[in-house]
Image: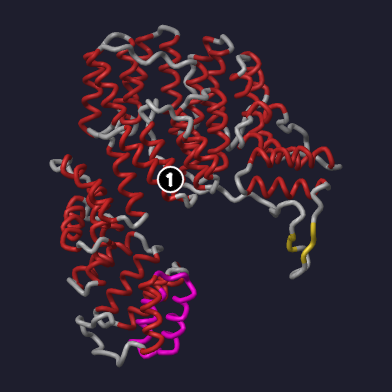
Amino acid sequence: MNFRILLATASLLALTACAATPNVALRGPVSGSYSFFDARTAYGQFLAGQAALRDGRTSQAADYFGVAGVLSDNPGVVSERTFTALLLSGEVARAAQVAPRGEDVSEAVKRLASLTRVVDLLASGKGKEAQTLLKAEPIAFPHRQAAALLGPWVAAAAGDAEGAAVQPSLQNDRLVQYFGQLGQARLFERARRYDEAETDYKALTSSSTTAGIFVLDHGAFLERRKRHADAIALYDQALAADPTDAGLQQARARAVARSAAPPLTTLRQGAAQTLVACAATFAGERQSQFALAYLRLALRLDPEREDAWLLLGDLLNQAGDHAGAVEAYGHIAPGSLQSAVARSKLAWTYQQAGDKTRALDVARQAVQAAPDDRAAQIALADLLRANERWDESVQVLDPLIAREAESPDWRVLYLRGIALERAGRWTEAERDLGAALKLNPDEPELLNFLGYSWIDRNQRLQEALVMVQKAVEARPQSGAMLDSLGWAYYRLGDYRLAVEKLEQAVEMEPGDPDVNGHLGDAYWRAGRQIEAQFQWQRVLSLEPDARQKAEAEARLKDGLGPVGPAASSTIAHN
């Protein structure tokens, strides 16, 4: 990867309009009625395309929309859908050919269509045509960032040295500021204006905001200038802040060995990076359809760009397109620095698709391929945990934690603590969770897990209450954390507060058997037996596991006995 940005986990935006497969029943305009749409009609093809688009089958959607456009008397809307489907499926050249431009096309689609045509021209080696189009059709919101960042690269491809040297800017837009400066540095270097290039690189790596993102770019520049000592010093400074970064470790080893430096970024590669940066921003803002479109555009320019394939796979996975995600992760070469990451993501894709055996096989292969890669080890341990193979998960984490004893990671201790607790090894789990909490005393998930573990065991209740209160203050919309708080009040005998908090928890987690069971217990202790029985009956309708089912059935048969002291802190959970 040429840059590193943390991406928030995002879900795909819902696509508009009804969705159905051809010749299937659809609820009609009259409530309760159904009608059938013939796939041989324009409307039937359009609906089939909508269904395919919704399900992530973008290539099929494009085919349906194409037929609908032929059959339809009003192809305007169909042309928009066809363009969108082709772009999201990665058929950028075809999308550019059918990019809608008419008066009946929405402005938002026209702007994305213009951007797509510019990118396709640039990818086709037609820099002058791309620049002419970019100037003739200024691209407005929400694609202004991409247009601004692409401008210098397009100018360079058109042979416009003056335009290529201009740093793009948009008012109060840091993305354009930072990646525009990176682009300027690279274009200065291509023009052999090395002092100006170095000024830009230094500005990026001297800023506390961007230093960690652009170290590899600056270091590669120094290596290309044969300034290996300067490059090593830069890498050492970054490694002091993040000693486990594999990219930095590899770059430092290369500089020490004075091996061949990374080649200068090509015009297409530089333009692609700006689009990936924009895609990452859209993904972080949960604008995932735009993120997908930008990644497809980036890959049209640079088909080997690994960070684009990884993010594309993540977004497709979140949309439920597991086959597409598998294909995306498969573009990472086996010997690549990102190979272990891709294999781990691939393993989780199979897990989400229900193929647990294959998921574990792929995760184990990732560890075998890179035995020292901590990310691969953590992914395997987490998959084993997800498959309830607790002791095996612990065995994977043991050597990793021992190796990092001098600088422990609270997240890895937390992961092992969860596995130990589930394996029934509470003393060891409590040790790990306590150590993790000392390292990160304000982490809500950790406060909640350890606090609830004590509450459920009727231990250290006052201390646990304070912990889960702190967790709820940090995440007031978390049903799981409200459940922990309600359960703490239950254990302490404050049934009024227990009912209040557990009712809130059930509103947020209506399908959780444990939360519903806890509310039933609190209702019973508060003297509301009929409501308690309703909650326990509801537990049985929520696909409970064997323990949850047995507890609910026992309560429905015998209840919980008489109500105990109103404020006892020793009430046992029957």
Magenta span contains residue 525: yes
Q: Which of 423 and 6 is in front in this view?
A: 423
Q: Which residues are the magenta region?
A: 516-545
Q: Which residue lies furthest to the right in this view?
A: 73
Which residue: 78% across, 36% down?
103
Which residue: 39% across, 35% down?
5
Q: Report whether 387 appears left or right of 252.
A: right
Residue 366 position, x and y percent, is 35, 37
Q: Report whether 456 appears left or right of 331.
A: left
Magenta span contains residue 428: no
- Residue 25 visible in image: yes
Quarter placement of the C terminus: bottom left
Disc 1 packing (10 Å; few <14; some 14–19; many ≥20): some
- Residue 172 visible in image: no
Residue 416 position, x and y percent, is 24, 52
Q: Which residue lies furthest to the left in this view?
A: 406
In the rendered image, the vertical position of residue 206 relative to residue 35, given as above or below = above
Q: Residue furthest top?
A: 192
Q: Mark 1 points at which residue?
A: 358
Residue 473 position, x and y percent, is 32, 63
Quarter placement of the N terminus: top left
Which residue: 39% across, 78% down?
519
Name the dominant secondary structure of the magenta segment. Answer: helix
Q: Report whether 172 appears left or right of 123.
A: left
Q: Residue furthest bottom?
A: 562
SS class of the residue under badge 1? helix
Q: Which amino acid does the dot numbered 1 rest on? A: Arg
